[in-house]
Image (cartoon, rainbow, N blue to C red):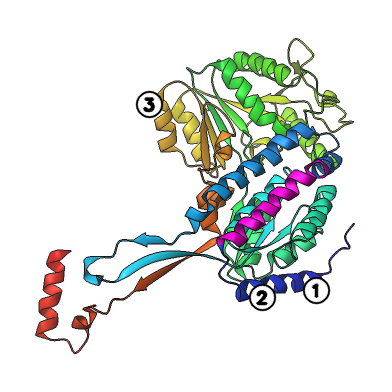
């Protein structure tokens, strides 16, 4: 186990990376590729150790889930980045306006310097290393602060990164919330934070003291619109998968469903069948993840109890039973393994905690609507979400929903899948964050795009120099006619 770093150690580590980034501004393609290949080697050789660490942190989480949701995503990112990195690094030629010709212009893509990454606990390997991979590809140095809620994973990341990377290339800083605050206050050239909106505001405020640009991926209440003409069985299965992956502890999980009024019983039955298909059992099923801590589990129970006390109808989904169970406050499960049974909540209102906070658990409120306009009005009345999902057959309605709503990203007739598309930028808007990464957009996020103009010896700009007079007036007249 690595010894904990003191605040002075962390500052010294940052200074080491900062100095290296200034001494070696130009980072050649071969160096960048070699760093990415080391990352690939680290994952290939030590993946089982990291999978076991994730399992130890959650208590119950299938290694196959971690392999898919963490490692597969990272492997596809590495493969895609290695394939296109040379193209992304090339200077981008731009067309020169006639009045500046025969000068030449281009945009150079340079490393920013040192990138800080403060990562969350829900996908503790993927969300720690994905921004780091892209930042390294862009030629930067990286300091990573992983979550204290996954201490086993964080410790293994620290050990492995120290084994595969020099400290001035890539390092891991472990610690609690106070350590994260210290890291956020360092004068990085860019800072990436993934987490809650409340903490994101604090990170942005700390970074602003140094004029540090940030990328914030903050989640929020991502809606799922079920249109009247959709295939309800198919929609329920895909909604259940998106909601219950990692027991709902996913930033882009559907946070609530907007359902045509009168279809409640149909959706309830379809959702019950979908849960039974995906998770034949809950307690002891390694495919169904535990809630990360007892405190988080207690919070979810409280949200359910508050909603029920305020008049909502809570249906606990028992996949071994023939139908959902209408829960009472005293029968919401004891949570011995922190594997919380899925629940549907009907009759939730805007005053309930379930509809004010991002749920981050296997609880799904269902809001009935009479007209599509009502559903869109409901979405637009709140903060802009990180993701939006729509299920239906009509392309005209689909276009209408896309045109009249704003969200970080959208998947149509499925959930989560836009995240897996390497050529689609991923990020939030408004309260759900700012700045996108993935693919070339992520690469550019960690670059300085420097404008370069090379003047020709035949340049005629001196014709516009003072002293101004009749010649100047004639030339300006010609220029105006050519514009």
Apparent side of residue 399 relative to residue 237 in the rendered image (left or right): left
Apparent side of residue 389 relative to residue 348 in the rendered image (left or right): left
On the image, the x and y values in percent for residue 359 come to 69, 38
Q: Earlier in the sequence, mark 1 or mark 2?
A: 1
Q: Determine contact: label 2, label 3, CB under 8 Å.
A: no
**Dot 2 corresponds to which residue?**
19
Quadrant of res 166 = bottom right
Helix, strand or loop: magenta stretch = helix
Nearest-to-viewer mark from 2 and 3:
2
Report helix, strand or loop for mark 2: helix
Nearest-to-viewer mark from 1 and 2:
2
Residue 8, label in figure: 1
Apparent side of residue 131 relative to residue 467 in the rendered image (left or right): right
**Dot 3 corresponds to which residue?**
396
Nearest-to-viewer mark from 3 and 1:
1
Residue at 44%, 35% in the rendered image: 402
Quadrant of res 453 = bottom left
- Vertical position of residue 283 compared to residue 377: above or below: above
Nearer the observer, 12 or 328: 12
- Name the residue furthest bottom: 467
**Residue 438 shows in the view:** no
Report helix, strand or loop for mark 1: helix
């Amino acid at each position: 186990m690595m010894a904990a770093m003191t605040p002075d150690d962390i500052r010294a580590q940052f200074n080491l990376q900062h100095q290296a980034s200034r001494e070696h501004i130009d980072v050649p393609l071969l160096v960048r590729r070699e760093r990415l290949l080391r990352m690939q080697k680290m994952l290939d050789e030590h993946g089982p150790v990291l999978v076991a660490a994730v399992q130890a942190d959650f208590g119950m989480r299938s290694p196959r889930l971690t392999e898919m949701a963490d490692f597969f995503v990272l492997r596809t990112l590495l493969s895609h980045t290695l394939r296109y990195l040379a193209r992304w690094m090339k200077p981008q030629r731009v067309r020169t306006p006639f009045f500046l010709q025969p000068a030449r212009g281009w945009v150079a893509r340079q490393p920013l310097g040192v990138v800080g990454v403060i990562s969350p606990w829900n996908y503790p390997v993927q969300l720690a290393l994905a921004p780091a991979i892209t930042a390294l590809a862009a030629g930067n140095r990286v300091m990573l602060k992983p979550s204290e809620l996954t201490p086993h994973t964080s410790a293994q990341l620290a050990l492995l990164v120290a084994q595969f990377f020099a400290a001035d290339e890539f390092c891991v800083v472990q610690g609690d919330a106070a350590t994260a605050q210290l890291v956020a206050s360092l004068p990085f050239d860019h800072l990436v934070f993934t987490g809650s909106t409340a903490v994101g505001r604090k990170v942005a405020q700390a970074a602003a003291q140094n004029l540090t640009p940030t990328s914030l991926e903050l989640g929020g209440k991502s809606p799922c619109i079920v249109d009247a003409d959709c295939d309800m069985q198919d929609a329920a299965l895909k909604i259940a998968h998106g909601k219950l992956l990692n027991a709902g502890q996913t930033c882009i999980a559907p946070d609530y469903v907007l359902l045509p009024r009168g279809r409640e019983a149909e959706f309830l039955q379809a959702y019950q069948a979908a849960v039974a298909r995906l998770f034949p059992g809950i307690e002891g099923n390694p495919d169904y993840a535990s809630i990360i801590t007892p405190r988080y589990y207690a919070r979810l129970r409280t949200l359910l109890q508050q909603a029920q006390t305020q008049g909502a109808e809570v249906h606990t989904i028992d996949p071994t039973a023939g139908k959902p169970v209408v829960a009472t406050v005293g029968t919401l499960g004891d949570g011995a393994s922190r594997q919380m049974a899925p629940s549907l909540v009907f009759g939730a209102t805007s005053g309930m905690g379930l509809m004010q906070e991002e749920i981050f658990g296997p609880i799904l409120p269902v809001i009935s609507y009479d007209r599509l306009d009502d559903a869109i009005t409901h979405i637009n009345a709140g903060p802009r979400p990180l993701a939006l999902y729509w299920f239906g057959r009509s392309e005209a309605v689909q276009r209408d929903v896309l045109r009249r709503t704003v969200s970080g990203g959208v998947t149509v007739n499925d959930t989560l899948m836009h995240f897996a598309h390497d050529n689609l930028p991923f990020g939030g808007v408004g309260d759900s964050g700012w700045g996108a990464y993935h693919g070339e957009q992520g690469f550019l996020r960690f670059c300085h795009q420097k404008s370069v103009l090379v003047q020709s010896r035949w340049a005629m700009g001196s014709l516009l120099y003072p002293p101004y007079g009749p010649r100047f007036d004639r030339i300006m007249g010609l220029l105006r006619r050519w514009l």
